Image (cartoon, grey):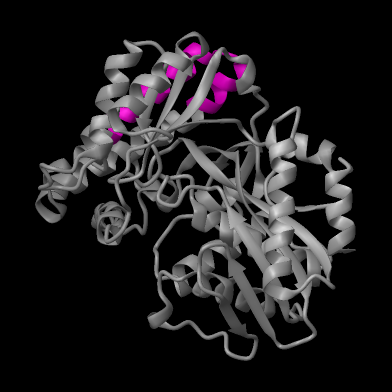
Amino acid sequence: MKSLEQLKKDLSNGLYDSILEKIYCKKEPFEIRERYLDLLNGFSANFGSDREISLFSAPGRTEIGGNHTDHQRGCVLAASVNLDVIAAVSLNNENVIRLQSEGYPLDTIDLDELSPEMSEYNQAKALIKGVVAKFKELGYEIKGFDAYTTSNVLKGSGLSSSAAFEVLIGNILNGLFANDSVSDVEIAKIGQYAENVYFGKPCGLMDQMASSVGAVVSIDFEDNENPLIKKVDYDFSKSGYALCIIDSGADHADLTDEYAAIPYEMKKVAHVFEKEVLREVDESLFMESLALVREKCGDRAVMRAMHFYADNRRAILEAEALKKGDFGRFLELVTESGRSSYMYLQNVSVAGSSIHQDVALVLALCDKFLKNKGAYRVHGGGFAGTVQAFVPLNMLEGFKTRIEKAIGEGRCHILSIRPVGGIRIE
C-alpha cells in the first residue's frame, strides 16, 4: 500500500505507465492515468485523503464461442477486454466494509451478518456479501475496509459487469487477507457462488472465469469443479479485423425469466435421459429419441438442445482455428454460431415482442453493412444488450459510422483483448 497522495504523484509522473500500457493495450495511457487519478479523488471525497491505498482492477469479458454452453458443462471460448471495474481500497480497522461505487448509493456490509437475503437479490451488496462469506468459509480472516470503485464496463452490454465486480471483490480479499493464495479459477468460482446464492441469478461460470483468468481462454466445464482451462495464444490485433461490441440499446431489466428458461429447458431434456445436464447425454441418443423429447419437453427445448451440441463443438474448433492462425475458418465458425443462436437457441428477441427487437435489428444491419465480410453474432445471454462483430479494418470507420447513425452515437465500441484478468496494480 502507498499513501493516497504518493499514489497520485506516482501516477502523474508516469511510474505506472508500463503496467497500464500492458493492461489496457494502449501505448500512451494518458486517459487511463487520469481515470485512476479521478478514482483516488473519489476515494478521498468519500473516505478522506490521509489513507494507505491499494489499487485493483477486474475486466469485462467477451464471449467468443459457446453461446449458453457453460451451464450444461460444455466448452466455451472467451476473453477479457480492456474495459474494467477499478477500485481504490484502504483498511478501516472496523468490522464493516463500506463500498462506494460511482453513481450509486453506499453499500455497507457488517462482517458479522453475511447470510443471504432474498430482499437483497439483484443488488451489488449481495455480491459483496456472497464473496466475503465464501472467503470466510474457506478460513480467511476478513477485516473491514473502505473502497471506491468506478466502471467503464457497460451495464447490460453482455460484457458482464456483474462478473467483473465479483472478480474485483475477490481480488481485493485475496490481496488484502489471503496473501494472493487463492487462484484465479477459485476466485471465479467464488464469484459464481455469490451470483447464484446471494444475487439470485442462476448463471454459469464462463463470465467469472474469463474475467478472472484473462486473455483468450478455452474452457471445458465437463468437470465443473475442475474446469480445463487453456490460454489461446493469438494476437487479434494482427488479424486485420477489429472486435466491435455494439450496444443495441435494449435493457436487460426484467428478463431474468427469459435467461433462466434456457438452462431450465436444456436440463429438462437431459432429465428425459436421467442426466443432469446435456453434456452427459450422447448426441446420437438424443437425436434417435426426438419424438419422445418433443413430447416431454416441447419443440423449443429440443432446438435449444440441438444448439448446445453444435455450439459445443464449434467452441473447440474456434480455438483450434486460432491456434493454427486460420482466421478465415474462425470467422466461418463465428457466423455459424450466430445463426444457430438465432434459429435454434432463440435468444435474440423476446417471444411475442414485435415493437422492440433491438438485437435482431443490429444483426440485420451487420448483415447488410458487412456483406459477407467479417462475422457477427448475438453476444452473451441475448434478448437484450449487444452484438459482437469482427470487422475488417479497412471497413471499420464506415461500419461504425453507419451503425451509429441507425441506432445512436457511441453505441459501437471498438475493443482490445486484455492480456491479464483480475489484478492488484503495483
Does 318 appear above or below 261?
Answer: above
Q: Position of residue 267 (x, y in %)?
A: 30, 56
> For the point 48% across and 82% down, which residue is it?
116
> For the point 75% across and 87% down, which residue is it?
94
Magenta region, residue range:
317-341
Does 419 appear above or below 146?
Answer: above
Viewer can see residue 223: no
State the quadrant of the N terminus. bottom right
Q: Is residue 46 left or right of residue 90?
A: left
Main SS type for the magenta part?
A: helix
> For the point 47% across and 32% down, which residue is it?
315
Does 397 appear above or below 117?
Answer: above
Residue 324 is a magenta residue: yes
Q: Position of residue 26 (x, y in %)?
A: 71, 30
Does 175 appear above or below 143?
Answer: above
Q: Of 224 and 271, which appears nearest the observer?
A: 224
Q: Of 202 and 354, which appears nearest the observer?
A: 354
The picture quadrant where one finds residue 15 is: top right
> For the point 36% across and 47% down, which residue is it?
381
Q: Position of residue 343 (x, y in %)?
A: 21, 33
